[in-house]
Image (cartoon, rainbow, N blue to C red):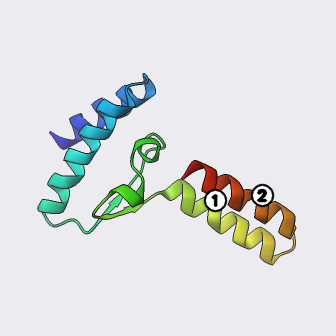
């Protein structure tokens, strides 16, 4: 049941129905937390478009964000990108969150 609802939400988000998708995903997450889940992994790129950690009462992991942050950290550590690029990335992140 939850899998079908998540797919419905994802297709809705792709179709521009973000509010409907958000409501469905919030309900599914609530059901999962009630069943004992402590962390929800936003394993589809559409999910973080409508669910952000600041509005939730559970831990939401966004794999895309984790990969991006890790890539930036590695690139800056290895001097592949400069401090200016890191600052621009930080500004963009604040604008989208």
Horizontal arrangement in the rendering, residue 76 relative to residue 51 (left or right)? right
Picture coordinates of residue 96, whole percent (x, y):
58, 49
| Label of residue 36 in the image | none
Per the image, the residue denoted by label 1 is 68
Q: Residue at left 68%, top 52%?
A: 92
Does residue 48 appear anywhere in the picture? Answer: yes
Badge 1 local density, few (<14 within 10 Å), some, or many (20+)?
few
Q: Quadrant of the N terminus?
A: top left
Q: Residue at left 39%, top 48%?
A: 51
Q: Residue at left 63%, top 65%?
A: 69
Picture coordinates of residue 65, whole percent (x, y):
56, 58
Picture coordinates of residue 78, whole percent (x, y):
83, 75
**Distance between the alpha carbons at the discs numbered 1 and 2:** 14 Å
Horizontal arrangement in the rendering, residue 8 relative to residue 14 (left or right)? left
Q: Secondary structure at mark 1?
A: helix
Front: mark 1 or 2:
2
Residue 10 falls in image quadrant = top left
Badge 2 local density, few (<14 within 10 Å), some, or many (20+)?
few
Does residue 81 appear anywhere in the picture? Answer: no
Q: Is residue 85 above or below residue 18?
A: below
Q: Secondary structure at mark 2?
A: helix
Picture coordinates of residue 8, whole percent (x, y):
28, 30
Q: Is residue 57 above or below residue 2?
A: below
The residue at the far bottom in this view is 77
> Could you say which is closer to the camera, residue 22 or residue 42?
22
| Label of residue 88 in the image | 2
Residue 16 falls in image quadrant = top left
The residue at the far left in this view is 35
Of the image marks 1 and 2, the number of the one nearer the N terminus: 1
Horizontal arrangement in the rendering, residue 49 relative to residue 57 (left or right)? right
> Could you say which is closer to the camera, residue 49 or residue 5?
49
Residue 3 falls in image quadrant = top left
């Amino acid at each position: 049941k939850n899998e079908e609802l998540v797919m419905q939400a994802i297709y809705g988000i792709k179709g521009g129905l973000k509010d409907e998708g958000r409501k469905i995903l919030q309900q599914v997450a609530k059901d999962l937390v009630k069943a004992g889940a402590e962390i929800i992994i936003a394993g589809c790129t559409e999910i973080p478009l409508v669910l952000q950690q600041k509005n939730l009462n559970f831990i939401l992991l966004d794999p895309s964000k984790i990969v991006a942050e890790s890539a930036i950290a590695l690139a800056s550590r290895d001097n592949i990108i400069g401090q200016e690029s890191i600052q621009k990335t930080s500004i963009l992140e604040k604008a989208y969150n």
